[in-house]
Amino acid sequence: MIRLVLRVLGHEYATPIRRTVALMTTTAIVEGLSYALVVPVLRALFGRTPADAWPWLIAFGATVAIFAVLRYLSDLSGFRVGTTMLRGMYYGLGDHLARLPIGWYSADRVGDVSALASRGLLQALSVMAHLLAPLIAACVTPLTIVAVMLAVNWQMGLAAVLAAPVVVAIQVWTRRSMAATDAESAERGREATGRIIEYLQAQPVLRAGGRTRQRFDMLDDSLHEVQRASRRSTLSALPGVVGLHFTVQAIFTVLLVLGAYLALGGNVGVAEVLMILVLAARCADPLLALAEMGGQLRSARSELERLDAVLSTDPLPEPREPIMPERHDLAFDAVTFAHGDRTVLEDLSLSVPEGQRLAVVGPSGAGKSTLLQLLARFYDVDAGAVRVGGVDVREIDTEVLMAQIAIVFQDVYLFDGTIEENVRLGRPDADDAQVRAAATAARLDDVIERLPAGWATNVGEGGALLSGGERQRVSIARALLKDAPIVLLDEVTSALDPVNEAAVHDGIERLMAGRTVVMVAHRMRTVQRADRVAFLEGGRIVEQGIHDELLRRSGRYADFWEIPDGAGGVNISPSHRHTSSVTVHP
């Protein structure tokens, strides 16, 4: 367990962990020695001069006091090391997640990481704070007591020693037999959590379908699987728990019978037998505690292994000698990119001169959003190169690259905080005047004026307390405040009402002014503002040129915009009427 903790956390924590383990081991030995002082106390009490017990009683009291101090210090050290490791792990996990490719974040993994970062880390690192001291005491204190028993009477001490391998064998067998059922229980628990979330999110659909009084079968099935997995886990643990209790009681019985036999044979006195039985009884409590700690230790180890798997995932590599781009033109040089078994882009070449605007259009699934994600280096290409200012993005430091780019997505995510806090994410060191100017340019000031708390209005988790148009204005204000030379826009007005669309378009125009822009769009008014249009289909550029020129060619682009749909001037052909909305593709 300790080796796994150090592998996950890093060996910079090795020294404080070893120091804490040494302190806890010393505490457990002192506890065992304090019980050893019961031997001379009982000898004196059962001897001819009971008053001789006083010095030993004083020594016993002093040892208990030393043990209490050591226990306090070791517990305090465990808590400090545990909290330090927890803080370090949160920072380490956050830094590592920020460097992983966006494609790594599948829906299942996002749920797993969420559970791991909340409950999992606390459960895993609680080992140092809550379980390590009892675990060491359960192992070291009985061994110390057995050593004392050997010194008092070798026959009874040897009987206790011979029982130790039996206890270890039971613990190992229990751990191995529980491994599969513990993994299954964890998996079923994660599935049930997902089904519960799905059930809550599906309430509008279920109610619209008149199923509010009916059971949600998938959730019921998932909860039944959790129940069955929990039952199997309990049944798997039962033999180990019962076996350990039976073994401990059997050891005590053997010592009792052996002591009686030796006493009746005159080989040992009654006082010595009583002392050994008292010591054996003190061994029983920590040994039985092992059964209770077994499940917690297995759960903690499981969480550590999951954490280790996440941290072992290779992030996008950073350049050893990063290059600073001096220009802001963009280029795709024979780019090929695949996600899983599907090739999203194939041998694609495209360029955007500095200060110009490129609109990328095409059917859903063509790879439009992937172009933006490759520019921001959310992924690395499989072949070819993506260049900013003539420099391969893989040769640019990630922080430097992201400082050059402002991104406005179709689905805006806002953090649970105030409007001002969300705008300031674009540039945290901006002064109030700059923040207000960005808000005015994005037409966000209209929204702020009608909100009761103004700038201090809380947007809720994900921006749930604002409308889609209001969230877009916050996002554009954030991008304006960042003042990056390159702007990437991903269908930012596709789902807005006419009033919000007009306001957002005004903000976008201010955002695009004087910058290099790549926009994924299907609104006619957006495309017409572009210096050049590229029509993407099947991962390839099939047409590119000026909007009016492409319409005159009567090719795929003209077909795509042939029939008006009445939505803000957008023209969409019948074959693409249901494919023009864009989702973000891996």
Image: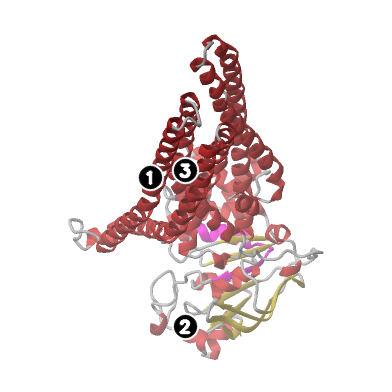
- Residue 446, visible in the rendered structure: no
Mark 3 vs mark 2, CA separation in Å: 70 Å
Looking at the image, tell me whether mark 3 or mark 2 is earlier in sequence order: 3
Label 3 crowd bin: few (<14), some (14–19), many (20+), radius 10 Å: many
Toward which corner of the image does residue 510 lie, by quadrant?
A: bottom right
In the rendered structure, find residue 246 and report the number of the disc placed on it. Answer: 1
Q: Inspect the magenta stretch and tell me whether residue 510 lies in it.
A: yes
Under circle 1, the secondary element is: helix
Q: Which mark is residue 489?
A: none
**What's the CA distance linking mark 3 and mark 1?**
13 Å
Q: Which mark is on residue 560?
A: 2
Task: Name the residue carrying label 3.
Answer: 290
Q: Position of residue 46 (x, y in %)?
A: 49, 17
Magenta region: which residues? Answer: 504-520
**Residues tagged 1 and 2 counted as in contact (Cβ below 8 A):** no
Rendered image quadrant of residue 186: bottom left
Q: Is residue 83 above or below residue 162?
A: above
Q: Residue at x 74, y 67 (%)?
A: 328
The image shows residue 59, relative to residue 135, as above or below, that is: above
SS assignment at label 2:
helix
Q: In the image, is 338 to the left or to the right of 182?
A: right
Judge from the rendering whether residue 511 lies leftward or rightward of residue 105; answer left or right: right
Amino acid at circle 2: Phe
For discs 3 and 1, the disc positioned in front in the rendered view: 1
- The tag earlier along the polypeptide, 1 or 2, is 1
Amino acid, disc 1: Phe
Residue 482 on image: x %, y %: 65, 53
